[in-house]
Image (cartoon, helix red, strand yellow):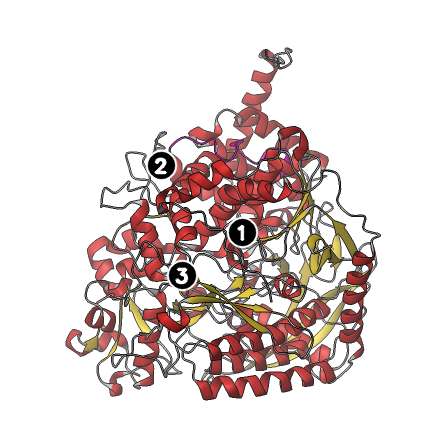
């Protein structure tokens, strides 16, 4: 059984991080160059970590599967980044951001982690502005803000509808600078396919060169995974097509515990599905809910009518009706389920009946079309490209879609997994968002982890390791790991069945969406736990991966990722089945209040479930880290 | 969760560039794609074609793609002779089949330029762009050393113009569209973005000199003012930024001639 020590410092909440920083061990400047750190991934968390660690003097190798670090999917985040700057003088504070995030996460995150996140949020904005991130500004030259779901203050900083792009390009510029200076070695188009553990410590990775197909061994003193979330297990999601779970999944199979895998976020405002050829879903930023009003017709017979012909009195602005104090800015999980309920009642709109209106006509009246265009123009453009409809004239149709995974590899307060030397940052870890993430908090967490947490905490680990002592890549552990990967590749290449990889990914996605999506039941999850292993068996027997393994082979890349999704999907269902409560994005139909809200069970499930791999075909072990709430009272979330 | 679309299905003939590897000879190969929903994207159409190829055990068409929402800059197709296809202001992934007539022939090639060698089929190597960024596409701001974000006001006009330039997605369409394979729009966008902000002034001269030098060394051509780059840019970045970069460059060259850098090395301290 894995040892799960959260290592949360003692003392008052607001002092924990400061005290911890003062107490953890340091590596002296001359010794830093004697330690090599591998950073896998170059999204917000990975590139900010690699750049900062390089600046500090460590030898850093940053490995990405993309052709350039600037491609990581952080780039697609639209709406903004939260920070407790209180520039709007509307009563914001570190405590309030902490409290909103804890409450938004439905009391399933660690207090100490979340407080630290809120504390460093202000440094992130300073850092990004210094790098030249062109945030929106007021005429006086100071920074502008907007509001996001789950908050009653305006604390979100933004760069039009492309905040993620600008923050990533900021971190990418810092990374590029350190690469140019020779402080960081950049390895592109290499996919991490195994973790190497030597004497119980993470000391390297195996990558596959996506251009030549060669397997390459990389040795280091510590390994950082910043490889993003696993929402593509659902096939259709707002993730980039290449986003995958392979790095964290293969680390899991080497002993790293997987925390709360069933906590997935279904984003309320995405463009609805239109056909079975569809490869991805596109988000319409939550920031639209600042000025947009969400509604469905009151009468079922109005659902197919032109929305502009439906009079005001026949529209049901259901979020404003059910949640008057938060209205259209209710948190994502709450808003998504409300949309589902409206559609289940038969009041959904669009061809499929799986859609609700997001209407900006009041905002256009108030701000003029030009005013709305300045705030959200690129979103209206995206909507138009995809649907061929003009949302300035007719309301957008939206529906919830998989968007983020709060679960991920378990880490302690230092962001180290239960495998010593293996650190996990950003969406790839489980730590800060509990059972539901608030809007504009993913960017905050990625950069907090990379710029302001790992540079301190990794020293505490490395100070206990001998300098210049990374293992040789000729060590038996490296050889074994490479052989493991070669065997997986060989098995995929030699199946030579009848169906393409996508066929299996689609079927897995349908199973996951049906049984482990917005609403889950015991029966459904049990069914999925029977169906997924069957599908997996069929996959290995009947997948066809053409071509060869010794050059660029995109079918092989996808096959390896889908093989991992097949296993991860099963773990997610198992986690959802054993968590007999509803909380945040995890909604079990059996556990709800009469009004359809989540019914948590703090006594039995006020904990993190950290799953531990037990070998092929064995049921994984469910370890538990109890969440001790010292400062906030766990209460029923209300946004009414 | 899936419904049939009421739109009329279309069929097209594809002429696709196939090339097994770097430096190898390539050729166009024809494929038929039938019964396509016009609301599917061009890349989704390629997915369907590839699924069929994989079913038959044939090597699928390699193409670069990731976010499929026009922001990551990975997709890079020349569609009927135009980088990112027939429509302005979008990336290849945002091209939908409704842009093509039923029965049309669509020619699909990779971005081609000497500094962008083809890796396989429709994928070319654009790492030269990263090299240019590494040479100077940044403001040196060590983590943790920044002042309060509101300490230096930035006029809204400057911030907005910087954002116009900063939107560049680094796809390389500007290079593919240019008969000289010039990367000046790409470089100008970064030089302007950072040079317009007060935070970017300290390194302004160094930045433009070293980015332009690296650009030239990578083998990109010069600008001859035809602005195909702006026309092909998925973010419609204006060629005005090229003029701005040229002014910056000229100023930097002159200043560096008259203000040589200090020869004194950093002291060792007490």
For marks 1 and 2, give the one nearer the viewer: 1
**x, y percentage for residue B26?**
80, 61
The residue sitting at 63% across, 84% down in the picture is: A533
Q: Residue A319, how many percent across, how many down?
A: 25, 70
Which residue bears the numbered disc 3?
A437
SS at mark 2? helix
Crowd band around label 1 with a 10 angstrom C-alpha radius: few (<14), some (14–19), many (20+): many
Q: Is A318 located above or below residue A257 in the figure? A: below
Front residue (pair A351, A285): A285
Q: Is residue A316 left or right of residue A343?
A: left
The part of the chain drawn in magenta is B133-149
From this view, report whether residue A238 is shown above or below residue A83.
below
| Residue appearing at x 57%, y 78% in the figure | A570
Q: How far is disc 1 from disc 2 in space, using C-alphas?
A: 41 Å
Q: Quadrant of residue A611?
A: bottom right
Q: CA gap, disc 2 to disc 3? A: 34 Å
- Observer able to see residue B180: no
Out of B15 and A294, give the one closest to the viewer.
Answer: A294
- Provide the secondary structure element on which disc 1 rests: loop
Horizontal side of B30 relative to A623 (left or right) equals right
Q: Which labelled disc corresponds to residue A452?
A: none
Q: Which residue is mark 1?
A: A415
For disc 2, the neighbor class at 10 Å (few under 14, some 14 to 19, many from 20) is some
Residue A517: image x %, image y %?
45, 77
Q: Chain of mark 2?
A: B
């Amino acid at each position: 059984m894995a040892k799960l020590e959260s290592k949360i410092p003692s003392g008052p909440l607001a002092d924990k991080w400061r005290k911890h920083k003062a107490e953890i061990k340091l590596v002296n400047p001359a010794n830093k160059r004697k330690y090599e750190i591998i950073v896998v991934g170059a999204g917000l968390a990975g590139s900010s970590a690699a750049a900062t660690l390089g600046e500090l003097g460590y030898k850093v190798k940053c490995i990405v599967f993309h052709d350039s670090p600037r491609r990581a999917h952080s780039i697609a985040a639209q709406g903004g980044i939260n920070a407790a700057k209180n520039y709007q003088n509307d009563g914001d504070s570190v405590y309030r951001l902490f409290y909103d995030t804890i409450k938004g996460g439905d009391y399933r995150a660690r207090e100490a982690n979340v407080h630290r996140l809120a504390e460093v949020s202000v440094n992130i904005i300073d850092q990004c502005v210094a790098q030249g991130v062109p945030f929106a500004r007021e005429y006086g030259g100071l920074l502008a803000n907007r509001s996001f779901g789950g908050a009653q203050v305006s604390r979100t900083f933004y760069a039009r509808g492309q905040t993620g792009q600008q923050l990533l390009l900021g971190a990418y510029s810092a990374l590029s600078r350190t690469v140019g200076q020779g402080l960081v070695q950049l390895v592109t188009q290499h996919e991490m396919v195994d973790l190497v553990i030597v004497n119980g410590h993470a000391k390297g990775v195996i990558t596959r060169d996506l251009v030549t197909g060669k397997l390459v061994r990389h040795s280091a003193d510590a390994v950082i995974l910043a490889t993003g979330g696993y929402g593509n297990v659902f096939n259709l999601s707002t993730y980039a097509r290449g986003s995958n779970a392979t790095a964290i999944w293969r680390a899991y199979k080497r002993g790293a515990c997987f925390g709360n895998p069933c906590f997935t976020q279904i984003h309320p405002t995405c463009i609805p599905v239109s056909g079975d050829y569809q490869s991805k879903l596109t988000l319409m930023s939550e920031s639209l809910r600042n000025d947009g009003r969400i509604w469905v017709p009151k009468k079922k017979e109005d659902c197919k009518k032109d929305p502009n012909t439906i009079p005001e009195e026949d529209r049901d602005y259901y979020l404003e009706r059910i949640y008057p104090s938060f209205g259209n800015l209710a948190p994502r999980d709450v808003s998504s389920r409300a949309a589902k309920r409206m559609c289940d009642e038969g009041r959904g709109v669009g061809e499929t009946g799986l859609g609700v209106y997001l209407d900006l006509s009041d905002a256009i009246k108030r701000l003029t079309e030009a005013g709305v265009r300045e705030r959200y123009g690129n979103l209206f453009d995206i909507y138009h490209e995809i649907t061929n409809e003009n949302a300035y004239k007719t309301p957008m149709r939206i529906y919830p879609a998989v968007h983020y995974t709060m679960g991920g590899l378990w880490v302690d307060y230092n962001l180290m997994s239960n495998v010593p030397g293996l650190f996990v940052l950003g969406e790839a870890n489980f730590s800060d968002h509990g059972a539901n993430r608030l809007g504009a908090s993913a960017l905050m967490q990625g950069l907090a982890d990379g710029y302001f947490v790992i540079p301190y905490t990794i020293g505490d680990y490395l100070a206990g390791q001998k300098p210049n002592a990374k293992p040789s890549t000729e060590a038996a552990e490296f050889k074994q790991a490479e052989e493991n990967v070669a065997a997986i590749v060989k098995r995929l290449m030699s199946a030579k069945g009848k169906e393409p990889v996508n066929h299996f990914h689609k079927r897995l996605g349908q199973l996951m969406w049906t049984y482990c999506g917005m609403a889950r039941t015991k029966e459904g999850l049990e069914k999925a736990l029977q169906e997924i292993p069957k599908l997996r068996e069929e996959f290995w027997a009947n997948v066809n991966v053409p071509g060869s393994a010794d050059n660029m082979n995109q079918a092989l890349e996808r096959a390896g990722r889908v093989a991992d999704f097949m296993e991860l999907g099963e773990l997610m269902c198992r986690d959802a089945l054993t968590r007999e409560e509803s909380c945040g994005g995890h909604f079990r139909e059996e556990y709800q209040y009469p009004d359809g809200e989540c019914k948590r069970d703090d006594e039995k499930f006020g904990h993190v479930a950290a799953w531990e791999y037990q070998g092929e075909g064995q049921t994984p072990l469910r370890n538990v880290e109890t969440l001790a709430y010292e400062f906030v009272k766990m209460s029923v979330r209300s946004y009414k | 969760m899936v419904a049939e679309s009421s739109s009329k299905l279309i069929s097209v003939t594809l002429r696709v560039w196939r090339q097994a590897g770097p430096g190898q000879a390539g050729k166009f190969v024809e494929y038929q794609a039938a019964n396509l929903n016009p609301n599917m994207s061009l890349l989704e159409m390629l997915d369907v074609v590839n699924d069929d190829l994989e079913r038959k055990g044939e090597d699928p068409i390699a193409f670069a793609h990731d976010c499929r929402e026009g922001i990551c800059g990975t997709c890079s197709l020349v569609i009927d002779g135009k980088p990112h296809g027939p429509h302005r202001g979008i990336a290849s992934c945002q091209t939908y089949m409704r842009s093509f007539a039923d029965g049309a022939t669509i020619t699909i090639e990779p971005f081609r330029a000497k500094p962008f060698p083809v890796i396989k089929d429709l994928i070319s190597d654009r790492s030269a762009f990263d090299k240019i960024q590494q040479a100077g596409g940044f403001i040196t701001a060590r983590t943790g050393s920044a002042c309060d974000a509101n300490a230096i006001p930035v006029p809204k006009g400057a911030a907005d113009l910087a954002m116009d330039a900063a939107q560049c997605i680094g796809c390389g369409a500007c290079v593919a569209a240019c008969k000289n394979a010039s990367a000046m729009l790409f470089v100008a966008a970064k030089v302007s973005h950072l040079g317009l902000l007060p935070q970017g002034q300290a390194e302004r001269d160094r930045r433009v000199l070293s980015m332009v030098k690296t650009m030239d060394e990578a083998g990109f051509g010069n600008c001859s003012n035809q602005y195909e780059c702006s026309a092909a840019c998925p973010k419609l970045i204006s060629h005005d930024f090229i003029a701005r970069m040229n002014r910056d460059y000229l100023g930097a060259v002159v200043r560096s001639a008259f203000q040589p850098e200090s020869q004194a090395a950093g002291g060792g301290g007490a």
